[in-house]
Image: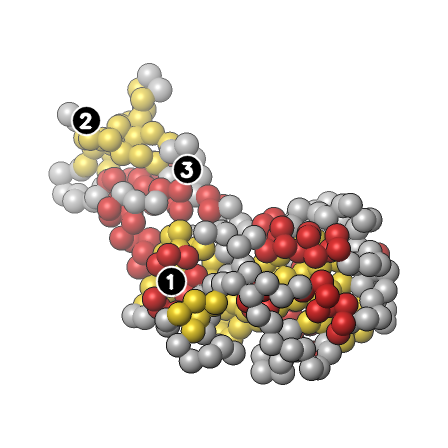
Amino acid sequence: MDLQILAPDGVEEVLTGADLVALIGSHLPDLREGDIVLITSKILSKSEGRVVDGERTDHVAAETSQIVAQRGQTVIARTRLGIVQAAAGVDSSNLEVGKSILLPLDPDASARSIREALLPNVAVVITDTAGRAWRTGQTDIAIGVAGIDVLDDHTGRTDSYGNTLAVTAPAIADELAGAADLVKTKLGARPLAVVRGLAERVLPRGEHGPGAVALQRPIDQDMFALGAREAVLAAVAGLHPECFGSPVDLDDLVQVLGRLGVVVLTEGGVVTATLAPDSNTPVSVVAQALGWLATPVDAGWALTPRG
């Protein structure tokens, strides 16, 4: 496979109302059928007038739909777009001092609009920088996509040893974003790039694919929807039950509570829990962590699976 990644120098400062299609045309004049154009979210946000006065900490709350984790001034937040990023995606780098920039209004829609206006048939990926759970450092990810399938689901395929794959699904759009960033670089003033050599992945004109929103893991399937501290506090306070996933099986519930000195009985389809004399287990907290709801009754708690 011959793969090329090109990023032009000399891209001028983008201002509110800038025509990004014209900008792409002037700096990537040799676009070819099947190319993939990558655009940093920063210039998209600038063109949309998303530059605001103040430090980024002044704007994080307004861009946050839920705090995932917080340690001191560091906030990991789920944004109004559903993307999980540090500071809810608010940034102040590569801007005038005293200014901050917010994420684009609808990066998937913008990617579709730009793609429709470009010739020939290319895919468009809007990129932004993000950290990763379990690993230090940052990489670019796709937050807006049009013209490619963002995932390559391998479920049901077999590897060279004959093993059937069950959960392998390369995040193609994120891989493209990270690869392009090697050429654009963080300080290179190269906000545009084109990846050439993957024309087979570009969808026919008029077919945009599911967009980057398809890369967002649903909260009830996310094992790390809250930080360690935040999960404990949410369980104690009975908040954010959607972040604890689907209910465990009744047998698992009985086993866990039993180890904590809680007796669980099932009669007539009703599940109840009572404390053993020497137990002080907070039943409602444990139940929430396991995806169940504990409602106080005379004999203890009635247990019902959430959802």
Separation (CA) of disc 1 from disc 3: 32 Å
Q: Quadrant of the C terminus?
A: top left
Residue 295: give x, y in percent of width and height: 24, 31
Separation (CA) of disc 2 from disc 3: 21 Å
Colour scheme shown: secondary structure
Q: Is residue 79 left or right of residue 111?
A: left
Q: Quadrant of the N terminus?
A: bottom right
Q: Which residue is mark 1?
A: 60
Q: Of the residues shown, which amino acid type is indicated by label 2?
A: Val
From the viewer's perspective, is the residue at label 1 or at label 3 nearer? 1
Look at 75% across and 55% down and name the residue there: 117
Residue sticking out furthest to the front = 17
Position above or below: 259 against 135: above
The answer to whether residue 88 shows anywhere in this view is: yes
Q: Is residue 81 left or right of residue 31?
A: left
The answer to whether residue 152 shows anywhere in this view is: no
Look at 13% across and 38% down and name the residue there: 277
Discs 2, 3 touching: Cβ within 8 Å: no
Look at 49% across and 77% down and name the residue there: 95
Q: Which residue is mark 3?
A: 247
Within 10 Å of disc 1 (Cα), the crowding (few <14, some 14-19, many 20+) is many
Residue 297 - label: 2
Residue sticking out furthest to the top = 268
